[in-house]
Amino acid sequence: MESERQQAPRECSPAPGQRAREAGEPAASPAQIEARGLAYARGGRAIFRDVSCRFPRGRISVVAAASGGGKTTLLRMIACLIRPDRGEIHVDGAGELVRMSDAEVRAFRRRVGMLFQFGALLDTLSVYENVALPLREHSRLSEVEIAAEVRRVFEAVGLEGVDDLLPGELSGGMVKRAGLARALIERPDILLCDEPFSGLDPPTVRRVEDLLLRVNERVGATMIITSHHTESTLRIADHLVMLLEGEAVEGAPLELVHGGDERVVDFFREPEAAPRGVGAR
Amino acid sequence: MSPTGAVSALGAWTLGAVRDLGRFSVFSAAVANAGRRPPLRLRRLVDEIYDTGVLSLLIVCVSGFAVGMVLALQGHNTLSRFGADAQLGAVVGLALIRELGPVLTSLLVAGRAGSAMAAEIATMVVTEQLDGLRMMSVDPLDFVVAPKAFAMILSMPLLSTLFVLFGIFGGYAIGVVVLGGDGGTYMSSLEDAVEFSEDVLGGLVKGTVFGVLVGFVATYRGFTATPTSAGVSAAATSTVVIASVATLIVDYFITALWGV
Amino acid sequence: MREEPRRDFWVGSFVLLGLAGVAYLSLSVGGVSYRGPGGLELVANFDEVGSLKNRAKVVIDGVKVGQVKSIELGKDFRARVVLDVDGRLALPSDTSASILTAGVLGDQYIALEPGGDTDVLKSGDSVQFTQSAVILERLIGKLIQNLGSGDSKGSKK
């Protein structure tokens, strides 16, 4: 699935926000997922007071917040793993998520792929068996056909030679790739990624950013990513949703970061102090 | 704590315990249901029987042998005062088959395999593996929990039987080889005293019931663990405590009912 | 894949071993198969059955040939015991049945002593000659009475 978007040359990484510029069209594509008035409190603390936001179809949206601000909570609500105390989530083509029955949720999840923060691969199965699991459970494909599909997603995420390894034997970057492969194998049209950049060294973060961009081009899925990596966010986001004090502020990344809400500007500000070690010794 | 404070705390605790029991029953019914429906997941069942049964063999057989030896020693002590040495085989065999086999096996297995089972499932909760399964529209109860629970139910009576056999053998080793009793008398008093429907069947029923107990308690505690590392260890230890106490209490009821 | 054939082997062995153990305990030790030869049902009436139980053994010269099938109160207020005995035996019709005790404290069982008659007992026939169980307390009571009456007056209360 080719997108009409231009490709920035991959040798020189785009400056923050350059991607949004390159896009050429407004981030206001038709919303595929829309949350309205979500409220959620746990342990006496209100995590969401009144969260409303939209996620455009086929675009990469990043949900940012300070730690504990509810990014993962929002993602898990879209995944129907938790229910908000109040509010609704509408998905174009699927209905309203919060009131769905178990059977409807199961059907909805067939269209959703999720990459968990630590991969969440089953640690007693090999990487191949993990990635093949959705197909073995749901489809009637033969082993040969399944192997072809696994090869396909491995190639899409850039994994090879790991078939028989256990998840515990993989490096952090490889775990994320394997998790992504598993999330993609049933060709979802919604992809959720929880903190894909966490725990990775800077070169690997770069590689994961490129990977997510590539997946978005090839697969065209609506991608929702949670992150507090400010740089990565600006590099890949078409649409930014910031969770602040129990509510959501959203818009095009450049606009939000450089103007508008003070709190957003603060969050994305570059550190001012010079790095230690520079200067007189 | 003031008297009223203590009473209301007790009331709250009781309510909590009743609620927990209710959740446990719902959970067990869901697991039983999931296990009965296809796909039967035999591959996973076999893997779990390996973890639960085969890996418990050493501890069960060694303990059985040791218990048999002690029974023979103590039994000989008491029986020889009444000149009833010849009944040693019966004493050792009956004690093992009716009580010690099923009960001790259950306690040992709860400690070894039960706590491991709870910890494994709890760890899967912490690392979001169960959520991962849910996102793939695979029911964790069906994929992970049911094979483990059913493996325990199948393994327990088999392990209990092996405990008994090694115990009889241990009793033989002490009663005959060391203390000089007659081997033939040992075996024949055993065979005379033991009756299938009274003793052997009762022992097997106990073994199976204990397997159900340990299996469901372990999987429940693991499944409902709080997703922290403290939660994992709490799941493991509470499994051992609850399963062990439940075994002993249920043992009384089965013994009372079976004898009727 | 990885080490599955080995695992399967161990699991299979474990299950087989366990089942073999159950079989051994049930059959050899527990005597579940006195589903041996049976088929000849005899009725014996006793004045006293003592602690005779169902499935108690029936022996001839110490060899087990059957079991007690049921113990009930008969119409004449005597105990009616039904025996299930090896059908291949040709027992003379003057065979006697006695209730004996195995050892001093042991279980009670039925011993058959074949007579010399040419007629043979058929299924449903009654055993003519029976010897009731000895109740230890009555025996002791009798002994005390005998001792007492052998004594001079004054000792009887």
Image (cartoon, rainbow, N blue to C red):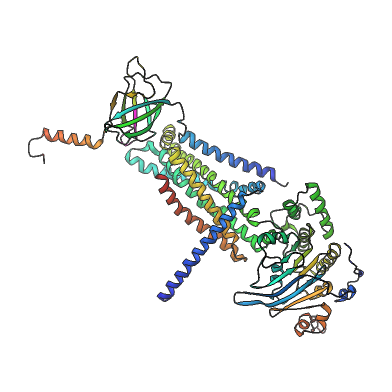
Q: Is most of the magenta stretch helix, strand or loop?
A: loop
Task: Return the residue nearer the eye: A90 or C19.
Answer: A90
Q: Is residue B122 above or below residue C55?
A: below
Residue A278 seen from this side: no
Residue at the location (52% across, 63% down)? B20
Quadrant of the image occupied by residue C131: top left
What percent of the width, then of the height, locates residue B178?
44, 39
Left or right: residue A121 versus residue B174 is right
Q: Quadrant of the C terminus of chain C?
A: top left
Tell whether position C152 is magenta.
Answer: no
Res. A271 in view: yes
Residue closer to the observer: A82 or A229: A82
What segment carries the magenta color? C103-110
How far from the left and from the top, in percent, is residue B205?
A: 49, 45
- In the figure, residue C85 lies in which quadrant? top left
Residue A48 x, y percent position in the rendering: 67, 76
- Residue drawn at x 40%, y 45% as measured from the top left: B259
Asked whether, in this view, residue C116 is left or right of residue C153, the answer is right
